[in-house]
Image (tube, rainbow, N blue to C red):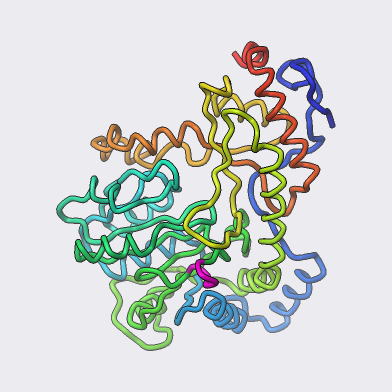
Amino acid sequence: MSEKKGVGDFVVAGGTPALAEILPVGQLYFPSWDRYEAAMRDIFDRRYYTNHGPLLERLEARLEERFSVRHAICVTNATVGLIMVAKAFFRDGKILLPGFTFVGTAQSVSIAGLEPVFCDVDASTHHITPDTLEAAFEGGVRALLGVNLWGGAVDFGAIDAYARSKNVPVFYDSAHGIGSQIGGKSLGGNGLAEVFSFHATKVLGSTEGGCICTNDDDLAALLRNMRCGYGMGRIVEVPVTTNGRMSEAQAAIALMSLDDLDEHIARNQRLATAYEEELGDIPGFSVCKPTGVDSTNRQYFVCEIDDRVLKLTRDEMAKILKAENIYARRYFFPGVHRSVPYRSEFPQYLDRLPTTDALCSKLLQLPIGALVTEEHVRKIGNVVREASRNAEGLRKHLR
């Protein structure tokens, strides 16, 4: 591995990579092989592989306790969860949501047969606010879909008050929010529902999966009956059924990840602190700390690049890091309003979300999670610092 001291030390100029192996973005926390093997053998011995099995029941009960909610309904992934919530309440109409989010958030609205209406976000928090919602609110909006980013959260009180003023409900995509807390209480009980992701890139992973948390008994009954092709729990009439069941294998991995969650969060927080010490004094390179929570999972480590000061664009820095085997990610890019198919189906939003467009050109996600060590953080800090010091010389090699 190579320490950077000048232009010639960088791979783009013919040098040796800072890291010997690729360091990906994503949490990638998995149980040890012996724990995994024992859990899979247990499943195969019982020959109960899916369909609301005993491991899933145990997982839902533990999530309800962890999130302090009445109901946690596990599903095959978070996007399916968002589709189910949208479809449970609405047959038609519009859903107002931020353009600054993962494309699956908007796709869930479209797949549910509803029309997305895109709003901008606050430049400092990256979240929706009553002001950004009001600027985009229009006739036919049936609900608000908030997104909680980076292990942080929206101002729930302000958003709930705004929703009441418009007489519309609000639900949340909290894919990034597992384990983050406000006043000692985990996210999970806000709005009609909060949907969490258990993808491998999340701090609590089941390789794939998610859950819907709600305190609404009637919504929970709808969701449990929508999740598969027959009734589950209290039987109610549903608008549609989905193949949204979580398997026993997913539930087993999620249970082990839940056992380790506090340890994983503590590790992330140590790594984030190390990053802040390494990167905090680099002009034009700012750390975006999660907002709106008292305690964060540090699910993501996101930075904002001011190319006027750093003399390198976000994309140029990402290219330099990738050459050094550091797979930083442009997050989000592009904004959903500029993604297929929304850029052609709803062109009216292309020039309405200036903050989203700016963030999509400036934000960079650095690796954090199971595969990252404090030595990696030191190496990454060295690459970023020396790249900023040698920006003019490096740009010649990026053309």
Where is residue 47, by image quadrant? bottom right
Q: Where is residue 132 in the image (x, y as percent from the top left)?
A: 30, 47
Where is residue 392, by image quadrant? top right
Q: Position of residue 228 (x, y in %)?
A: 43, 75
Where is residue 390, by image quadrant? top right
Residue 173 vs 347, above or below: the answer is below
Q: Which residue lies furthest to the right in this view?
A: 1
Q: In this view, does 291 lie to the left or right of 139?
A: right
Q: Is residue 72 left or right of residue 250?
A: left
Considering the image in quadrants, where does the C terminus appear?
top right
Q: Which residue lies furthest to the left in this view?
A: 139
Bounds of the magenta segment: 182-187
Residue 47 vs 285, above or below: the answer is below
The residue lying toward the viewer, choosing from 24 and 209, is 24
The residue lying toward the viewer, choosing from 368 and 389, is 389
Q: Is residue 134 left or right of residue 311?
A: left
Query: Is 169 in the magenta?
Result: no
Considering the image in quadrants, where does the N terminus appear?
top right
How many badges with numbers are in the image?
0
Which residue is located at x 65 percent, y 74 percent?
Answer: 255
Q: Where is residue 387 in the image (x, y as percent from the top left)?
A: 68, 23
Residue 220 vs 328, above or below: the answer is below
